[in-house]
Amino acid sequence: MLRTTLASSRVLRVSVLGLVTLTAAAVFTTGTADARHYRHRTYHHYHARHHVEHESYSPPFSSIIVDANSGATLSASSPDASRHPASLTKIMTLYLLFERLDAGKMNLDTEMTVSEHASEQAPTKLGLRPGQTIRVEDAIKGLVTRSANDAAVVIAEAIGGDEDDFAKLMTRKARALGMTHTVYVNASGLPDDEQVTTARDQSTLGRAIQDRFPRYYRYFSTETFNYHGQSIRNHNHLLGSVEGVDGIKTGYIRASGFNLVTSIHRGNRHLVGVVMGGRSGSSRDAIMRNLLAENLEKAATTRTVAAITERNPADANIDIAEAETTSRPNQAVQVQAAAAVQDQVQAVVQTVALDLGPSSTTPTTTPTAAVKPTRMLLVVATCVTASRTPAPRTLTTTT
């Protein structure tokens, strides 16, 4: 019986050592992959929860109405408060695409290849498949009508090489335009705590894209897009229902509420409005209608303000560096947590190594030795949990 006990003890200890070794490997290989997987994984139950208004749902609200002729702010509510842009993000994605088109580096018939990463984006999307191609013009229409997240990433990869690098270009462009409170980390607007903007910044972008790219801005007035047998209607319901509205973009994720940037030309007057944090698409649209109606008569009838120009790229880079610094404390906490997990795992490995030393060949009858394997298993379980538990996030889609 003594031999049986010794054999069982050795087997248990060897099993624990193997488990610890595997855990140590998992801790140092899954962190980055899990973080990136979160950003791009498919969101479930989309149709059941999307655009459903709940009485308890009250996202933070912001709005601004700007006279595009004079540059004056005619109405504002928390215009500089930090908000999530959701699919308003795609305005900047298209700004950078229009820039390439205007420079002759791409044309409307340029074919862009769909990557696996692009095809895996959460709805809403066109359903693009890895390896296929999509024309630039079709991608533009896919963004302004369906707000296609897969097409947004195709554009990002065609211009920036990958989505992360493209997001840096987006933030740099935001700084150049004077959008001092905007940071982009993806091309679509899918949920990310670090992707932020303000109503004022979005009004700046809404004016700038019209001033600089009038030829391509017209795509924002597309009401219906026919693609591979599908007839896709624009999410912007003010198009065709409010006289003079010519664009530009809607957006929604759970964290942001229902967002809208609108441009209206009526007579010689021109307003650009932003509403962020609507409780539903219909209430957001109603708020925008009222704001436009209340402020249209206040607008100037002649253009006196200069077009929005871009700042020196070097200045924009300095602003970006300062913005990135604000996110480093979170990264430091994550590194410290990973180091703590590593220390725990190493301690367990050392404990098991000692238990497997020369003394392990002699019988032990003390209660402490009997419970060591159980304690080690508990520590290993704690390490695994600590290394795999993600920060709480809200899973939603963007339109």
Image (spheres, helix red, strand yellow):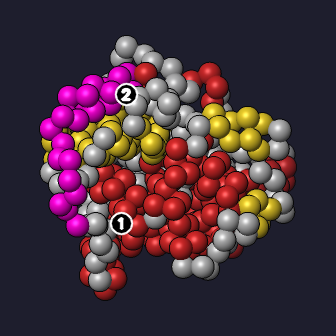
| Mark 1 Cα shell of 10 Å, populated few (<14), some (14-19), many (≥20) | many
Q: Residue 2 at what x, y percent from top left?
A: 80, 50
Identity of the residue drawn at 42% across and 16% down:
54
Decide which of tag 1 and tag 2 comes sooner along the chain: 1
The reply to whether residue 307 is visible in this rendering is yes
Rounded to the nearest whole Å, what is the CA distance between mark 1 and mark 2? 25 Å
Residue underneath mark 1: 174
Q: Residues within 10 Å of mark 2 (few under 14, many from 20)?
A: many
Tag count in the figure?
2
Residue under label 2, please give it. 284
Q: What stretch is highlighted in magenta?
A: 283-306
Q: Identify which residue, 140 or 92, lies in the foreground.
A: 140
Which residue does the image show at 52% across and 44% down from the upper left? Answer: 221
Please state which amino acid type lies under the numbered disc 2.
Answer: Arg
Quadrant of the rendered image containing residue 397:
top right
Q: Is residue 277 left or right of residue 141?
A: left
Residue 144 rendering spot, x and y as whole percentages: 56, 46
